[in-house]
Each structure stands twice: as C-alpha cells, then as structure tokens.
Amino acid sequence: MRAKSPSGCQVVKKDQKCAVLRAFVLRSLESRRLSGADCSSICLVARSLESPAARVLASLADEIAALRINVRAVITAIDSNEFGGDSTVKLCAPFTAESTRVVHDARLYDAHEQLILDDATTWVGDCMRREPSKTDAFERFAENCAVSTKWSQQAFNSLWRAGQPAKFDATPNVGIAAMTDALKAIAVPGQSVKEVLLNSATRH
C-alpha cells in the first residue's frame, strides 16, 4: 500500500534545516491563503522557543498574523529550571502567554518535536533531549496525510491539557531575534509568499 505522504522521512544538512522547514511552512500558509479556508490554529510541540521549528514560526510571524492564524505551543521545562516548576519563557511573536503552555514532565526528554500546520500537514523532528543548536538529522514531512495529522493533534491536545500557562519574561531574546532576521533574509524584501515559494522550489 502506497503511503499518502510523498515526502516521508528526510535527512538534511544541519545548516539547511531551517530553510527547508521554512519552505514547508510557507507552502501550507500559501495553500491556506489560496483556499480561503477558515483559519485554524498552528500547533507546535517543542523543547523551547529556541528550537528550529519555533524559530521558523517566529520568522513568519507577520505572514501568520496576516492570515489571522493562532499559534498554540507546548514547550518543555528542560530549558527552564530543569522541570523545577519555573514556567517563565522569553517573549517572541507569534507566541503569546495565552497560547503557550509548559509541561513539567521528564518523560518528554525522549519525545520528538512536532508541528501541525493544517488538517493534513505535519512535521516531526528533533528529539527534545537534543539541544536546539545541535539539531539531529531526523525529520518527517507529511503533506496531504490527514491520518498523521489526526494522531499528532491527539498527542498535542493531551500535552496541552497537561501543561501550565507560560509566564513570559519580556526581556528581548537576542538569539531568537538574530535567527529570525537570518531566516527572513531567505526571501527578497517585497516578495509575496507565492514568490518566495517559487524561488524556494527552484533554488539549488
């Protein structure tokens, strides 16, 4: 039986990881824009807002806001006092205190990060145990696969219920800001999302 997801597991070079993931997210955003579908949430499970998937969403905060999409995120407490009860994280759009929760459970060390972009598009990647700056090579891109999205959404909902509301530290996060600027530089200023996608598809 042929899998519904044409891309499946991929191995990419570390320095290409964010660019590849960003193009993947842009495809979903462009699809939403063209379809005019009701704007549901993007759901993220990540080690922290320093993780590649979170940084990619931060670099696309303007595009996400323009489509009126709410980003819901569940992050671990690995980077906030080692599960010691501290739920404070650095503020970074498009993440808000109302839509971000922290899970204090050491079992998440062995989980993988995931990103649910729409009803049939998901990404699964780095192990939570891996430091964001040392991302591993595992990634799975699932497009046009409602089954994968269903299972991922169920997992996200369970983690969301187990999480605690995040308390944001308003101190600017220089690391996230620098990476966001670098990711934004992938696109030429003034380009539409469609043009960015076309360039991403033809870039070698």
Image: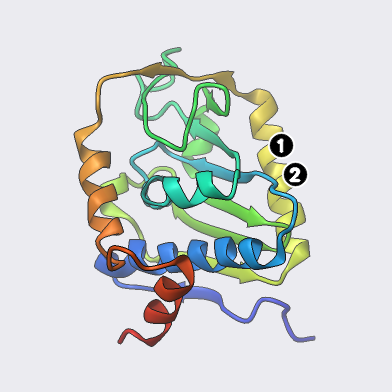
Examine the rendered structure and indicate whether residue 56 appears above or below residue 101.
Answer: below
Dots 2 and 1: beta carbons under 8 Å?
A: yes
Identify the residue shown where x is 43% and y is 47%: 62
The quadrant of the image that shows the N terminus is bottom right
Identify the residue shown where x is 65% and y is 61%: 32
Left or right of residue 158: residue 78: left
Q: Which mark is residue 154?
A: 2
Residue 112 visible to an observer of this rendering: no
- Residue 7: image location, x then y, percent: 57, 79
In-front residue for pair 81/141? 141
**Displayed quadrant of residue 50:** top left
Examine the rendered structure and indicate whether residue 99 appears above or below residue 19.
Answer: above
In-front residue for pair 65/204? 65
Residue 120 visible to an observer of this rendering: yes
- Residue 113: image location, x then y, percent: 50, 49
Read off the residue under disc 1.
Answer: 157
Local secondary structure at mark 2: helix
> Between marks 2 and 1, how big is the CA–CA gap?
5 Å
Local secondary structure at mark 1: helix
Identify the residue shown where x is 25% and y is 27%: 172
* Badge 2 amino acid: Gln
Left or right of residue 153: residue 70: left
The quadrant of the image that shows the C terminus is bottom left
Q: Which mark is residue 175?
A: none
In-front residue for pair 80/144? 144
Identify the residue shown where x is 57% and y is 18%: 164
- Residue 137: image location, x then y, percent: 37, 66
* Badge 1 amino acid: Asn
Examine the rendered structure and indicate whether residue 157 appears above or below residue 118.
Answer: above
- Residue 157: image location, x then y, percent: 71, 36
How crowded is the residue under tag 1: few (<14 C-alpha within 10 Å), some, or many (20+)?
Answer: few
